[in-house]
């Protein structure tokens, strides 16, 4: 059983028990709870934290954990609020209907805009196989390396002082070399640190285009890009992708038709198709954008997810750009941890000044302890070993997934490249990807519908299948087996 499910089960059990206690009654000790429920000290601590956050218990260091009062009170100098808590510990709200009017002028419900992003971040129940998430399973991530890096970072002189707004010079220099090479066009001063890749995308979109302007995006593309574009008040215009990346003939047409000044792309292991931009099209993308007087935002999210059997990677577009056309985005999150929210935006000239101004208004700076820990991590010899091990495991999972798809669902898999963490499946004619996704969830496998990856009407029904989030290759194969049964049911029912 996973630690997450153990915490959930213990919290549920304690919640039922605590509700029978009178106010102020002390709960059993942590040792007693460990013995009774056969769980670790960490599980007990996390479960108590859940109940404390719900307002059901109060933890008093040195004394124990006690049942909280069923009412909340106001400040000592004022009257009691008398807000009654529900059994789950949340306050019963008053009349909130006025907010519907207050928010109606804001341009539409944000929950619809963010729904596809929430879907990719959803953590499935313990008995559901995860073929949806874009984050690798915890067993594929360097948790010991990260823990050691955080410990060393916390002891660095000045580790808790306020960092420069652009980021630590040493870390910016590391990103500059990693992106552009030692003799490339990117200098330390061209790098701005951000709080992860999604934050970097937000900063770029809000900086490079005015509200209401068109922004060219690949089609299909990562829903998080579409959400960021729309949240910034911009209009995404799709440009189709094939096995060699974005169609540059259609890219030129789109620039001419829309007069857009920004094109967002993922040239390496594109999400969701896995396409790698071909050498011929790389040069064309830069030429077309330069002629249009436009920026290319290069989301290089998967460069560290190269498989062990992959050929040599192409350089980032930014490494071949000396005219400031490319705004490059890089993050370590996928290969390190969802919690290592450290990324880098690379740009030059007035564009960098614009990015810097947006970043400082939005979030001031990236927390220094995270920056220090990132420096410790990438300098550790174990980091390179981790990346090699990750590449080997991703190759093994992809090999198992491809074999299972050819066996169970022949014809749904198109071309793919040895890199990234996902496969793009073409569903049979007449199958609704939303219906299939819901049915798959009921059958115990979580996959991603293709519709949210399109800025306009999708040309066909697709699924994105992630082989990185499951516990192991066997789970990936089992998930595909369950998916076949669901597809048979949907197509024959």
Image (cartoon, helix red, strand yellow):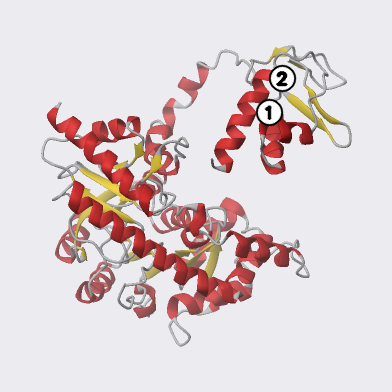
Circle nearer the N terminus (1, 2): 2
Q: Percent x, y for residue 251? A: 20, 62
Location of residue 227 (image quadrant): top left
Label 1 SS: helix
Is any part of residue 454 visible from this angle? Answer: no
Location of residue 254 (image quadrant): bottom left
Seen in the image, is 253 located left or right of residue 126? left
Q: Nearer the viewer, residue 29 or 49?
A: 29
Q: Residue at x 25, y 67 (%)?
A: 292
Q: Percent x, y for residue 487? A: 20, 36
Which part of the image, by quadrant, shows the C terminus?
A: top left
Circle 2 residues within 10 Å: few <14, some 14–19, many ≥20: some
* 120 in relation to 283, above or below: above
Image mark for residue 18: 2
* 342 in relation to 446, above or below: below
Q: Residue at x 46, y 79 (%)?
A: 186
| Residue that sits furthest to the left in the current view | 429
Q: CA distance from mark 1 to mark 2?
A: 9 Å
Seen in the image, is 417 located left or right of residue 79? left
Q: Nearer the viewer, residue 304 or 182?
A: 304
Q: Percent x, y for residue 263? A: 30, 60
Q: Which residue is mark 1?
A: 51
Circle 1 residues within 10 Å: few <14, some 14–19, many ≥20: many
């Amino acid at each position: 059983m996973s630690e997450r499910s153990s915490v959930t089960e213990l919290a549920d059990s304690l919640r039922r028990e605590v509700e029978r206690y009178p106010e102020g009654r002390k709960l059993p000790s942590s040792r007693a709870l460990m013995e009774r429920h056969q769980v670790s000290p960490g599980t007990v601590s996390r479960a108590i934290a859940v109940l404390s956050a719900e307002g059901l218990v109060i933890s008093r260091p040195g004394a124990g954990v006690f049942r909280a009062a069923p009412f909340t009170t106001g400040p000592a100098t004022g009257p009691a609020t008398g807000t009654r808590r529900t059994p789950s510990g949340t306050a019963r709200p008053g009349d909130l209907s006025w907010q519907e009017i207050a928010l109606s002028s804001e341009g539409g419900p944000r929950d619809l805009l963010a729904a596809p992003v929430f879907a990719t971040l959803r953590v499935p129940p313990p008995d559901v196989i995860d073929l949806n998430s874009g984050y690798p399973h915890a067993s594929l991530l360097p948790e010991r390396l990260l823990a050691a890096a955080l410990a060393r970072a916390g002891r660095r002189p000045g580790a808790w002082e306020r960092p420069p707004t652009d980021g630590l010079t040493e870390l910016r220099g590391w990103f500059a070399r990693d992106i552009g090479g030692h003799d490339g066009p990117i200098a330390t001063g061209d790098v701005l640190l951000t709080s992860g890749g999604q934050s970097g995308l937000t900063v770029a979109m809000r900086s490079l285009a005015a509200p209401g302007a068109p922004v060219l995006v690949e089609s299909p593309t990562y829903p998080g890009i579409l959400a960021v574009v729309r949240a910034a008040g911009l209009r995404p215009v799709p440009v189709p992708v094939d096995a060699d990346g974005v169609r540059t003939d259609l890219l030129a047409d789109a620039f001419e038709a829309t007069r857009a000044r920004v094109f967002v792309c993922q040239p390496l292991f594109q999400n969701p198709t896995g396409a790698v931009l071909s050498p011929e099209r790389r040069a064309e993308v830069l030429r077309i954008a330069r002629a249009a007087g436009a920026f290319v935002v290069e989301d290089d999210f998967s460069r560290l997810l190269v498989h062990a059997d992959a050929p040599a990677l192409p350089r980032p577009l930014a490494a071949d750009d000396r005219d400031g056309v490319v705004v490059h985005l890089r993050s370590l999150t996928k290969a390190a941890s969802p919690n290592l929210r450290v990324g880098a935006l690379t740009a030059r000239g007035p564009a960098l000044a614009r990015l810097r101004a947006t970043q400082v208004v939005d979030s001031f700076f990236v927390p220094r302890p995270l920056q220090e820990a990132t420096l410790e991590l990438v300098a550790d010899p174990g980091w390179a070993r981790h990346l090699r091990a990750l590449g080997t495991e991703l190759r093994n999972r992809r090999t198992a997934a491809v074999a299972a798809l050819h066996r169970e669902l022949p014809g749904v898999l198109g071309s793919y490249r040895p890199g990234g963490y996902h496969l793009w499946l073409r569903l049979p004619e007449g199958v609704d990807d939303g219906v299939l996704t819901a049915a798959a969830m009921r059958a115990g496998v979580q996959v991603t519908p293709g519709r949210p990856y399109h800025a306009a009407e999708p040309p066909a029904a697709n699924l994105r299948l992630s082989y990185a989030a499951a516990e192991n290759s066997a789970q990936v194969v089992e998930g595909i087996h369950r998916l076949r049964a669901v597809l048979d049911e949907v197509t024959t029912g």
